[in-house]
Amino acid sequence: MQHRSFSGARRRSPGAPGNQGRNFSARRPSSPRGKQFIHPSKFINRAVENETIPDYVPTHAFTDFALSTQLQQTLAYLGFTKPSAIQDQAIEPILEGKDIIGLANTGTGKTAAFLLPIIEKLTYERVPNSVLILAPTRELAQQIDAEFRRFAAGQKLYSAVCVGGANIVRQIKELKRGPHVIIGTPGRLKDLIQRRALILSATTFVLDEADRMLDMGFVVDIRAIAALLPNERQTLCFSATITPAIEKIVNDFMKDPVTVSVRRGATADHIDQDVVVAHDKMHKLEILTELLAGKEFEKVLVFGETKFGVQRLADSLTKSNLPAVAIHGNKSQGQRERALRSFKNDEVKIMVATDVAARGLDIPDVSHVINFDQPNTYEDYVHRIGRTGRAGKKGKALTFVPPHNDYRN
């Protein structure tokens, strides 16, 4: 079977059949479901051969930070010696009580950058409900909670996770116990507030992946929650990008924030991006099945457009002796957790997901991202491919596109 890449076709002369041309104008193919048209050339970026990404050289060791003896011992036990860039630059000003705007890609250690100073503060001021952390998805909220428990081990500090798709009665019971840290998604937290199950008194307020929360339409909920918090508080905002909406939140919520930026480019040179031409869904499935059988496809995240399509694709791959798990909005919380755990632990090498389900996931060592269905926007594309090539490693991304003639002027 021949898998022609679009990158080869781009080099044809202007009059050649199937030429795309970079100056694409005139008529464009209609986009289903109101999709933004994205020219296939934007899905192509050759990783620089033999590129070496220099290791970040921190100015601190973890032992240089003003952290308690117990927290230092925990870090040493966990093997934390050299901080990442965001940790190196953000921990100290957070410890000093300053508001922080942290610009960092997912997978750069930003969770520890805000959790370690929070735990340090709680060591001396064990006030219930004194920390509120907002995250865009339940998976990310659970990951933050797992990290908190790991770093706070043995310190009798408690957390509660309040997310949609989980038993709200159980969450209300956990809140009644007075956890020190509350981690949740905006929608569920707003629901708990309306039920009078949650009284906001946090003096530390964290917005994690703020840009994704705004993209998902949580801006009204975030503002409603922030309005109920004490005016005298420390606010930490972490985002991959600074948009006008983020700037407005910064201006409204924060006081003289310190900006720490360690963000890499949106489509980094270490992610090798290309397209694969397929005529229809059956052809796409045939090509995908052949690709995934290759040894180099070690840990693959496949993106689909709809919940039903994602489930069908995962089932079809599994029937073809390519075990796959799926995460999407129709899955229960327990099902999503089991699927994610099996993928993280390398029990299966393929996970098929929708955009919403995969937002906020921090999965190490993803070798490939495959866009079985094209994303709705280029911003979604950038977010998808960011699941590979983490922490300076090289990654590969493939996007299925229709035959070239469909893009003629």
Image (cartoon, rainbow, N blue to C red):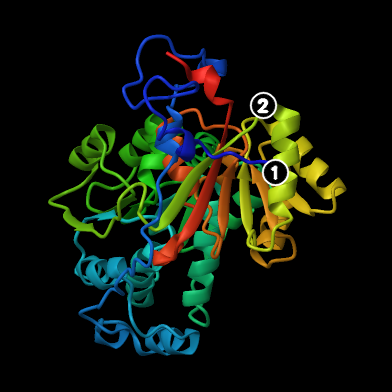
Q: CA distance from mark 2 to mark 1?
A: 13 Å
Q: Which amino acid type is marked by label 2?
A: His
Depth check: 14 or 230 in front? 14
Q: Earlier in the sequence, mark 2 or mark 1?
A: 2
Q: Is residue 315 left or right of residue 211?
A: right
Q: Quadrant of the C terminus?
A: top left
Q: Based on the displayed image, in which of its 4 quarters is residue 366 positioned?
A: bottom right
Residue 332 percent coordinates (x, y): 73, 44
Depth check: 171 or 281 in front? 281
Q: Which residue is mark 2?
A: 279
Depth check: 196 or 188 in front? 188
Outermost left residue? 256
Instruction: Identify the element where label 2 is drawn.
Output: loop
Q: Which amino acid type is marked by label 1?
A: Leu
Looking at the rendered structure, which numbered label has been put on residue 288?
A: 1
Q: Is residue 293 visible?
A: yes
Instruction: Identify the element where label 1 is drawn.
Output: helix
The residue depicted at 31 percent of the width and 75 percent of the height is 55
Q: Is residue 133 depicted above or below 3 in this figure?
A: below
The residue depicted at 50 percent of the width and 14 percent of the height is 29
Residue 196 percent coordinates (x, y): 52, 39
Pointer 2 local density, CA inside 10 Å: few below 14, some 14–19, many at least 20:
few
